[in-house]
Image (cartoon, grey):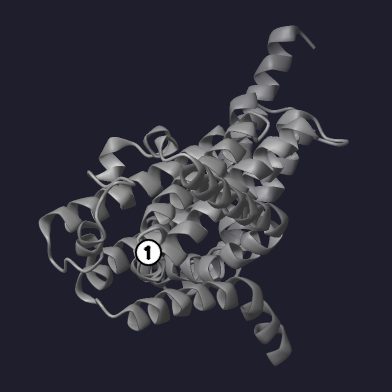
């Protein structure tokens, strides 16, 4: 047999193969295109029943094409078609509502529980920073200007009178109070983002940011406590602060997880360790944005209109209890019901 005769035979075999089966491929492709763009209800009952049959026919064609070394372009087409069919017929398909439900019912709380060491380390660093800031300002009031930015201080300093400091706490709809609240929320949001984003540098920036944020909190608290307004300031901050500070602690924990995974990857490569830590940290950070939105609502509405110290502490304490139960107790209740 001459080479040209062999080539003609291959072409004839390929043409015959296409002629016998191409109609099924096109039908399968058309049905997949319809259900991918719309939904299974776009197909009739007969069309739905034909989907697995056409899928098996495509798999059979792909097997034959590979075994006989037919046209490589045809093999690539059949591989792509079979892959689409597999993902549609056997892949896990979840609606947007299901994904959102899974995030709030499982993924987010599970990520926070996974980060428990880093979260409570971050909380501890905040407390240490607050104690340090309080002590520094109490020892030498010049530290206050070094710790608190002028835009955050809003003209308040260790020399402010008790009346001036009290007017900030109970100013109601005062323009300065509203502006300061907005600035404080923006500041804490930036702290959360930085504490997470800079964690890749072996977690050192995250630790320093959390410590500094606590130090600022302690410095502000000292000037109020020195005027006998510490309890009142705690209530003013607690309405949104328990949510916002907890969110910052989680953001710092997410940054620490990535940084420590890079610094101590164990048996994994640094990139693999960072990728594994990043999945947990990213889930936690999505939740942090939700917490900051809650904090913004509490700050913009509750803290400006509620002037009772007891009511402020009740709201702040209730929100903290809600987050703790949601993150750490909800899983126990759900498993106990099963």
Of 23 and 35, the residue lying toward us: 35
The answer to whether 74 is drawn above or below residue 252 in the figure is above
Element marked by disc 1: helix
Is residue 83 among what the camera can see?
no
Q: Quadrant of residue 267?
A: top right
The answer to whether 118 is drawn above or below residue 11 in the figure is below
Residue 104 coordinates in the image, percent (x, y): 51, 69
Q: Quadrant of residue 41?
A: bottom left
Figure quadrant of the C terminus: bottom right
Q: Residue furthest right?
A: 267
Of 37 and 295, the residue lying toward us: 295
The answer to whether 196 is drawn above or below residue 50 in the figure is above
Residue under the image location 41 percent in, 65 percent down: 230
Residue under the image location 41 percent in, 40 percent down: 141
Residue under the image location 55 percent in, 33 percent down: 198
Residue 90 coordinates in the image, percent (x, y): 64, 61
Give the residue pinned by disc 1.
237
Figure quadrant of the N terminus: top right
Is residue 265 among what the camera can see?
yes
Q: Rate crowding at label 1 as few (under 14), some (14 to 19) or many (20 or more) other CA atoms within 10 Å.
A: many
Of 172 and 263, the residue lying toward us: 172
Q: Residue furthest bottom?
A: 337
The answer to whether 40 is drawn above or below residue 5 in the figure is below
Of 150 and 338, the residue lying toward us: 150
Specify whether 166 is left or right of 290.
left
């Amino acid at each position: 047999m001459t080479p040209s005769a062999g080539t003609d035979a291959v072409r004839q075999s390929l043409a015959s193969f296409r002629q016998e089966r191409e109609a099924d491929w096109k039908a399968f492709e058309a049905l997949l295109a319809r259900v991918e763009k719309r939904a299974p209800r776009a197909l009739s009952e007969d069309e739905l029943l034909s989907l697995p049959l056409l899928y098996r026919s495509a798999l059979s064609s792909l097997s034959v094409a590979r075994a006989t070394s037919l046209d490589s372009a045809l093999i690539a087409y059949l591989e792509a078609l079979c892959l689409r069919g597999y993902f549609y017929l056997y892949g896990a398909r979840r609606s947007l509502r299901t994904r959102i439900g899974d995030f709030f019912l499982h993924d987010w709380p599970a990520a926070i529980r996974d980060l428990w060491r880093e979260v409570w380390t971050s909380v501890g660093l905040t407390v240490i920073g607050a104690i340090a800031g309080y002590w520094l300002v109490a020892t030498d009031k010049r530290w206050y200007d070094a710790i608190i930015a002028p835009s955050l201080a809003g003209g308040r300093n260790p020399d402010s009178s008790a009346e001036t400091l009290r007017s900030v706490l109970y100013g109601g709809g005062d323009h300065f109070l509203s502006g300061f609240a907005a600035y404080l929320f923006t500041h804490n949001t930036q702290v959360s983002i930085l504490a997470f984003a800079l964690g890749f540098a072996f977690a050192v920036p995250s630790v320093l940011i959390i410590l500094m944020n606590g130090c600022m909190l302690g410095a502000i608290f000292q000037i109020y406590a020195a005027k006998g307004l510490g309890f009142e300031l705690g209530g003013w901050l607690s309405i949104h602060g328990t949510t916002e500070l907890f969110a910052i602690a989680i953001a710092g924990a997410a940054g620490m997880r990535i940084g420590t995974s890079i610094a101590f990857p164990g048996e994994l490569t640094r990139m693999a360790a960072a990728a594994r830590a990043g999945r947990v940290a990213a889930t936690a950070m999505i939740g942090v944005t939700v917490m900051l939105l809650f904090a913004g609502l509490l700050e913009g509405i509750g803290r400006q209109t509620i002037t009772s110290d007891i009511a402020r502490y009740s709201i702040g304490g209730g929100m903290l209890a809600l987050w703790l139960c949601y993150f750490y107790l909800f899983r126990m209740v759900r498993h106990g019901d099963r």
